[in-house]
Image (tube, rainbow, N blue to C red):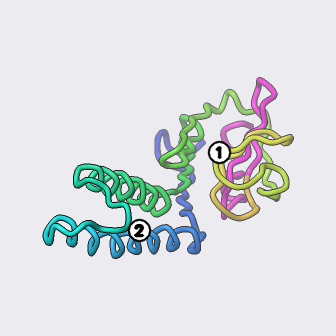
Amino acid sequence: MPHHNAPQFYEIQRFRNPWIRYSVAAITVGFILFFIPGAVKQFIYHEPWGNKPLSDVTLIAVGVIVLGVMFALCFFFFSLKLETVVTSKGVFVRLFPLAKRVIPFDEIVKCTPTTYSAIKEFGGWGVRSGARGKALTIYGDQGVELTLKDGQILLIGSQRPEQLHQAISQYIG
């Protein structure tokens, strides 16, 4: 059996859809480029911005809220990652910033490398449930399917499913 607490498997997968990531960033920059001239016109030159101008307080509130949401979406899509770690204590899976789960080895009955269709079987990537069970995925179609003692199926997406399977299997027999 491997060394006590050293990771036997470690993988970080990042969200790879550049269209979504850069679209959100472009919309944020577009809003800033649209908002700043209007805000300058209204605040500095004291000319109402638009046909039905907002009050200064409302304009500031709208700007702060919209920018906050846009920056939060940028942070979300640029920081989204699936981290999988196998140590002697169990399997740690975290889809940052959405979910995390620790699965002790005594809860795992079976571990199988698998190919899946995220869209057909789970409705997409992320933290999902489908007819096949639950899934933590971020991209691709490869992973490891864990059957737990309570009958639950958990699919963990991986770009190295054979190595993940091997790391888990050494602890479950």
Image point 55% across, 41% down: which residue? 99
The x and y percentages for residue 102 are 56, 35
**Residue 88 quadrant:** top right
The x and y percentages for residue 48 are 26, 66
Q: CA distance from mark 1 to mark 2?
A: 26 Å
- Viewer-side residue, 108 vs 71: 71
- Viewer-side residue, 41 vs 166: 41
Image point 42% across, 59% down: which residue? 70
Q: Quadrant of the C terminus?
A: top right
- Viewer-side residue, 1 vs 53: 53
| Visible residue check, residue 169 | no
- Viewer-side residue, 135 vs 8: 135
Q: Quadrant of the N terminus?
A: top right
**Left or right of residue 142, residue 64 in this image:** left
**Residue contact between numbered discs 1 and 2, judged by CB atoms under 8 Å:** no
Local SS, label 1: strand
Q: Which residues are magenta?
A: 144-173
Image point 66% across, 58% down: which residue? 158
Packing grade of label 1 (10 A; few <14, some 14-19, many >=20) is: some
Q: Nearer the viewer, mark 1 or mark 2?
A: 2
**Left or right of residue 20, residue 26 in this image:** left
State the residue position of label 1. Answer: 127
State the residue position of label 2. Answer: 28
The three-letter amino acid code for the residue at tag 2 is: Thr
Q: Which mark is residue 45?
A: none
